[in-house]
Amino acid sequence: MFGYYKPLKPNHMKKLYSIIFACAFVLIGFNSKAATIVVGVGVDATFTPANVFTPSTVSAAVGDVIQFILGAGTHNVTSTSIPGGAAAMSSGTMSTLGQTYNYTVTVAGTYLYSCTFHTGMNGTINVGTSGIATPTVDLLTSAYPNPFKDKFTFKYGSIESIDLFNIIGEKVKTFELPKNETKTEIDLTDLNTGVYFIRTYHEGVIVETKKIVKTK
Ligand SMILES: [Cu+2]
């Protein structure tokens, strides 16, 4: 049989649904933290194979992970236009059903990407500076130096705690900040080098998400 599109077998569909379901669970689990946003690759909204990204346009906040999951066919995710300072999107060839490509957005702006195998197979990610309303001045914080080697200094006002997340949105540490202080040194000697996100809290509500980079 000469089908351009191989229909998904029921067991494959089941597998795909379970993957998507697992991702939805992750999304709920990260509710107030970095979110994981799933984009289907090579399937439409009804899981029918097609040369599309579904949804083709998503909105995200800095720190969120865009998880591309191959639903059918052979495709790739390749950025064509990204904000200055952002890393290129380059999944390589995706050809195994359920194969994923995770891309963490680190800079606000508009990201355009395509599958280079299929003309017109395009997608857009719109990234706001934060999913959270602009904080009032006394809640603004600073972390320096950034990048840092082992420790950085954290300056704050009415912030009570900080959560630290790795690049894939897993919480790796929580710090309770000393009250009646406006400055504290945070020691991350035990962490691997890489990109992290700190999230600040005031009365249990998220105030800011900031990117910090640990170097050698
Ligand atoms: Cu494609």
Image: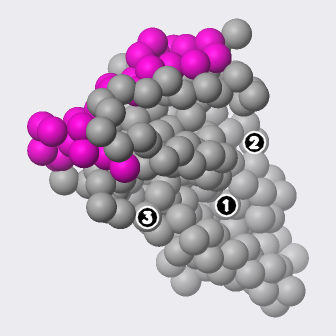
The residue beneath circle 2 is: 93
Residue 167 lies, with reference to residue 160, above or below; the image says: above
Residue 189 percent coordinates (x, y): 70, 22
> Which one is earlier in the sequence, the residue at label 1 or at label 3?
3
**Residue at image point 74% right, 81% down:** 18
Can residue 24 be seen here? The reply is yes
The residue beneath circle 1 is: 69
Q: Mark 1 against mark 3, which lies toward the viewer?
A: 3
Residue 138 colored in magenta in the image: yes
**Residue at image point 24% right, 37% down:** 157
Residue 110 percent coordinates (x, y): 31, 39
Residue in front for this viewpoint, 93 or 189: 189
* Distance of label 2 from label 1 (alpha carbons): 12 Å
Q: How dense is the environment of label 3, judged by Cα within 10 Å: few (below 14), some, or many (20 and up)? A: few
Residue 189 lies, with reference to residue 163, above or below; the image says: above
Q: Amino acid at mark 3?
A: Ser
Residue 129 colored in magenta in the image: no
Q: Secondary structure at mark 1?
A: strand
> Which one is earlier in the sequence, the residue at label 2 or at label 1?
1
The magenta region covers 134-160
Q: Amino acid at mark 2?
A: Thr
Q: Is residue 123 left or right of residue 151?
A: left
Residue in front for this viewpoint, 214 or 52: 214
Q: Is residue 22 left or right of residue 37?
A: right
Where, quadrant-wise, is the C terminus in this rendering? top right
Residue 57 percent coordinates (x, y): 37, 57
Q: Is residue 201 left or right of residue 33?
A: left
The residue beneath circle 3 is: 32
